């Protein structure tokens, strides 16, 4: 099984190290990995079944080490449904993190806002999602060792972890909103009519990723928390067209704020553990 082989390789590369928190960094957000101490970087090409991202802004390596007092395994780059290679590699990567010791997954992404009052540069904690991809990574025979055939998606985005993220944002004076993230297939951006539709359906932000990782993670029992960086207003809500360069530029501009929030969040997890024990 590729996930087990990849997990064994992860454990082998950093003897004595066991990651507790998996992190997936989205478009233009890879800089967080550079802040990881005692870093061991493994290219995805050396991890069985891992994805090879083909999109600019996605490095394609797993970085192990310490961040905010936690042991982390950070995916610097992801694959998207629109790359056409299927969702198996994504599933393998998330399951490998689980088998390598992670109990929590932090998902980040760039997204377009569907709320005009929440503009570029703002951070949005993901409270729920709409899977509009027309695909589900769990399609096919169920692998019972990882989870049930029909996993629940109630509270897929962990309310306690989100509350901690909110607290840390408040403490650090970071402006954080909350909202529902819709995953749309891409790679073409949405039409203005599709943006209006997504708003009517209850979405607050739209992107082309993140939801498959959440589904696989919940299936195998990982707790999930997520934060989107708003890089633009949804097509038709702002002025002019949206493009990928703009996404990368806006994500980089907001990345330091997201990094501060995530480091605070990881430190907060330690404080919570201390309180519980
Ligand atoms: N739509 C889809 N994906 C995105 C967008 C958008 O407006 N912005 C960043 N990723």
Image (tube, rainbow, N blue to C red):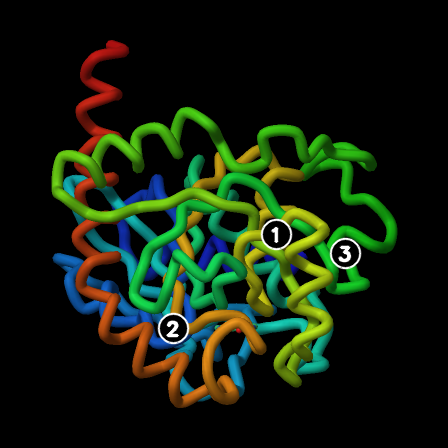
Residue 47 location (% of width, % of height): 49, 69
Q: Residue at x 21, y 12 (%)?
A: 275
Q: Residue at x 39, y 34 (%)?
A: 162
Of the image marks 1 and 2, the number of the one nearer the N terminus: 2
Q: Is residue 192 or residue 156 the one in the foreground?
A: 192
Residue 190 location (% of width, % of height): 65, 77
Q: Is residue 76 or residue 227 the one in the foreground?
A: 227
The disc at residue 155 is none
Mark in front: 1 vs 3: 1
Mark in front: 3 vs 2: 3
In the displayed structure image, the side of residue 215 where residue 225 appears, left or right: left
Of the image marks 3 and 2, the number of the one nearer the N terminus: 2
Residue carrying label 2? 61
> Is residue 92 visible in this depiction of the protein?
yes
Kindly indicate whether the residue at mark 2 contacts the one at mark 1 (C-beta within 8 angstroms). Answer: no
Mark 3 neighbour density, 10 Å: few (under 14) some (14–19) many (20 or more): some
- Look at the picture and state if 262 lies above or below 59: above
Q: Residue at x 46, y 74 (%)?
A: 44
Marks 3 and 2 sit apart, C-alpha to C-alpha, by 24 Å
Q: Considering the numbered disc 2 on the image, is that residue within a helix, a strand or a loop?
A: strand
Marks 1 and 3 sit apart, C-alpha to C-alpha, by 19 Å
Residue carrying label 3? 136
Mark in front: 1 vs 2: 1
In the displayed structure image, the side of residue 147 where residue 248 appears, left or right: left
Mark 1 neighbour density, 10 Å: few (under 14) some (14–19) many (20 or more): many
Q: Considering the numbered disc 3 on the image, is that residue within a helix, a strand or a loop?
A: loop
Residue carrying label 1? 203
Residue 87 location (% of width, % of height): 69, 66
Kindly indicate whether the residue at mark 3 contacts the one at mark 1 (C-beta within 8 angstroms). Answer: no
Residue 171 location (% of width, % of height): 13, 35
């Amino acid at each position: 099984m590729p996930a087990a082989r990849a997990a064994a390789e992860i454990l082998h590369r950093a003897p004595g190290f066991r990651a507790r928190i998996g992190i997936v960094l989205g478009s233009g957000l890879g800089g967080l990995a550079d802040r990881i101490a005692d870093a061991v970087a493994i290219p995805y090409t050396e991890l069985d079944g891992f994805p090879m991202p083909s999109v600019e802004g996605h490095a394609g390596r797993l970085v192990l080490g310490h961040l905010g007092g936690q042991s982390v395994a950070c995916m610097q780059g992801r694959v998207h449904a629109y790359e056409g290679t299927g969702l198996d590699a994504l599933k393998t990567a998330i399951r490998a993190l689980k088998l390598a010791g992670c109990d929590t997954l932090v998902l980040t992404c760039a997204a377009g806002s569907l709320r005009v009052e929440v503009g570029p540069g703002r951070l949005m904690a993901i409270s729920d999602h709409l899977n509009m991809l027309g695909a589900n990574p769990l399609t096919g025979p169920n692998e019972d060792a990882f989870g049930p055939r029909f996993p629940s998606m109630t509270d897929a985005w962990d309310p306690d972890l989100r509350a901690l993220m909110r607290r840390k944002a408040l403490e650090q004076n970071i402006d954080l909103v909350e909202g529902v993230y819709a995953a749309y297939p891409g790679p073409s951006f949405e039409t203005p009519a599709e943006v209006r539709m997504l708003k009517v359906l209850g979405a607050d932000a739209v992107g082309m990723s993140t939801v498959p990782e959440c589904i696989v993670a919940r299936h195998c029992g990982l707790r999930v928390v997520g934060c989107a960086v708003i890089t633009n207003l949804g097509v038709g809500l702002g002025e002019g067209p949206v493009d990928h360069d703009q996404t990368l530029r806006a994500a980089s501009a907001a990345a330091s704020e997201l990094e501060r929030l995530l480091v605070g969040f990881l430190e907060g997890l330690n404080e919570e553990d201390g309180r519980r024990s």
